[in-house]
Image: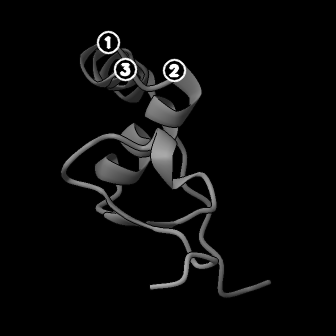
Amino acid sequence: FSGWMKLDFNHKTVLDAASISEGSDMSYWDSLLAATMRQNAVLNIYTENSKDFKVKWLNVVNPFERK
């Protein structure tokens, strides 16, 4: 799909992810995703896995959750 943009991470992102994981009790892989998002100014995530993203600066939306 031509409208998608691939985001990459670097050594700083990996260090940020380790810090996020340690400070928020998130898994390393979820922390790496969050750190990559923050590095690229993406502050919204739509996921069924909303309970695992525990950082205040990230807006987490479960599209399947009824309000």
Disc 2 marks which residue?
Answer: 28
SS label for mark 3: loop
Q: Where does the image place residue 42, in percent across and percent down from the top left?
A: 36, 64
Q: Amino acid at mark 2?
A: Tyr
54 w.r.t. 57: above or below = above
Q: Residue at x 49, y 40 (%)?
A: 52
Of 26 and 29, the residue lying toward us: 26
Estimate how packed mark 3 is, as few (under 14), some (14 to 19) or many (20 or more) residues with alpha carbons within 10 Å: some
Of 56 and 8, the residue lying toward us: 56
Q: Where does the image place residue 8, in percent across and percent down from the top left?
A: 54, 45
Q: Amino acid at mark 1?
A: Glu
Q: Residue at x 64, y 77 (%)?
A: 64
- Between tags 3 and 2, which lies in front? 3
Q: Residue at x 44, y 85 (%)?
A: 67
What distance separates the C-alpha of mark 3 from that of mark 1? 6 Å
Q: Where does the image place residue 9, in percent across and percent down from the top left?
A: 49, 37
What distance separates the C-alpha of mark 3 from that of mark 2? 9 Å
The numbered disc on residue 67 is none
The numbered disc on residue 25 is 3
1 w.r.t. 11: above or below = below
- Between tags 3 and 1, which lies in front? 3
Q: Amino acid at mark 3?
A: Asp
Of the image marks 1 and 2, the number of the one nearer the N terminus: 1
- Determine whether, in the image, residue 1 is placed left or right of residue 57: right
Estimate how packed mark 1 is, as few (under 14), some (14 to 19) or many (20 or more) residues with alpha carbons within 10 Å: few
Q: Where does the image place residue 5, in percent across and percent down from the top left?
A: 59, 71
Disc 1 marks which residue?
Answer: 22
Total number of numbered labels?
A: 3
Whether pointer 1 and pointer 2 mark residues with C-beta atoms closer than 8 Å, the reply is: no
Query: What residue occupies the far right of the structure in this picture?
Result: 1
